[in-house]
Image (cartoon, rainbow, N blue to C red):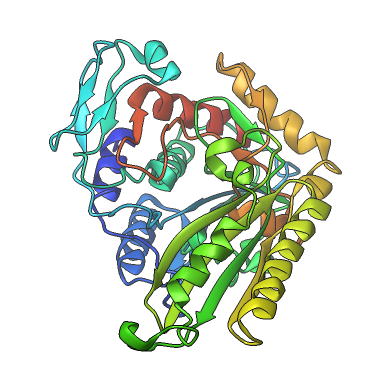
Amino acid sequence: MSSVKERFLRYVQVETTSCEANECCPSTPGQKVLGQMLADELKAMGVQDAFMDEHGYVYGFIPAKGKTDAPAIGLIAHMDTSDAVPGATKPRVIPAYDGGVIRLENGVEISGFDFLDSLKGQELIVTSGDSVLGADDKAGVAEIMTLCERMLAPDAPDHGKICIAFTPDEEIGRGADLFDVPGFGADFAYTVDGGALGELEYECFNAASCIVRVKGVSIHPGSAKDQMINASLVAMEFAGMLPPWERPEHTEGYEGFYHLTGMSGNEEAAELRYILRDHDSAKLEAKKAMMTAVCEMLNRRYGEGTVTVELKDWYRNMREIVEQHPEILDRAKKAFSANGVEPVIQPIRGGTDGARLSFEGLPCPNLSTGGYNYHGRKELIPVPAMEKMVDVLVSLVKA
């Protein structure tokens, strides 16, 4: 029997960074490498109908045992990792954290975070400092896989049908695009894709993306007066016209933001890529309207067609669906409490596959994995938190 730690260390070494620029599914080939590995492991341990489909989605189920009128419960995690920093992970294990500064191999230091004091003495898994760790969401994958092995053991408790799925491309907002909700077969589900141990989330952002394209006029700088339109400078103007206090680094809780995720350009053409987020749908619409208004203002200044914006909705706040099913949240709270973990209900300052799936007929709140500092080189996860989450999942699915 493999431990959750062993599984996690194995999975994070498979390169699965997703790529928004690629329109295929999955967007990168490494996701299918991990997907096939998971499908093979599920088959080997006895999960029924375990397979990876042509798009890289992995499915399987464990039949009900004993109490057959128990609900069919789904557990979902995603296989891809963020492209915010490189994803070629070389994990490092700290057997017993001493409470001090964690110095990574390339000079990056982990220090100054409030949560570090609570981790003293625990076994931690960190990065080399050159990449993300991938606990978002390979910790969720490892925990669900370990849960499967536990529930297939002869001494497993009675339970209803347990439906398992691992998705590609969640980090670029496409994880639910080709998800087979009817074939999945669950009455409701949980994404295991949260952070610190105990998090229980059923509110998320309403989300959209915006691509700003600027068409300039390139003229030799020696004769550019009243002729040149420098696309890169116009793009900078665009960015400067958005409220700086509504950036991620200045917001928290229910506050939304405009987040510049990428930029490129020269005199002739420039591009800005934004994600727009707000828990309040009306406020998200106002942010989308702001992008359009800035575009129109700059076109009046530089000429029609100089600036264009392409807006795309990603997902909606799942609260309006999940709160109609309080028994799903009660089950999760009881599972945490049964294992000595205080459930912490808070809004997600992000999103999960569950946000989309909730609106497709599969109510799907989000559970913690135990990790910290996702999407960066300072990402880490305590091994005891992963082990505890496996216990929580057992309590969650048993009849």
Q: Residue 396, how many percent across, how many down?
A: 62, 33
Pick the front one: 28 or 377: 377
Residue 198 in sight: yes
Q: Quadrant of residue 376?
A: top left
Q: Is residue 199 left or right of residue 119?
A: right
Q: Residue 83, how many percent across, how many down?
A: 37, 58
| Quarter in which the N terminus is drawn | top left
Which residue shows up at 23% across the image and 54% down it?
Answer: 88
116 over 359 or under it: above or below: above
Q: Is residue 189 left or right of residue 374?
A: right
Q: How many marks?
A: 0
171 over 339 or under it: above or below: below
197 over 298 or under it: above or below: above
**Name of the residue lying farthest toward the right:** 324
Which residue shows up at 45% across the image and 84% down it?
Answer: 228
Q: Residue 190, how many percent across, how many down?
A: 62, 44
Pick the front one: 172 or 353: 172
Which residue shows up at 32% across the image and 52% down it?
Answer: 85
Q: Is residue 109 left or right of residue 134?
A: left
Which residue shows up at 41% across the image and 30% down it?
Answer: 386
Q: Quadrant of residue 353?
A: bottom right
Q: Residue 227, how many percent across, how many down?
A: 48, 88
Residue 59 in sight: no
| Quarter in which the C terminus is drawn | top right
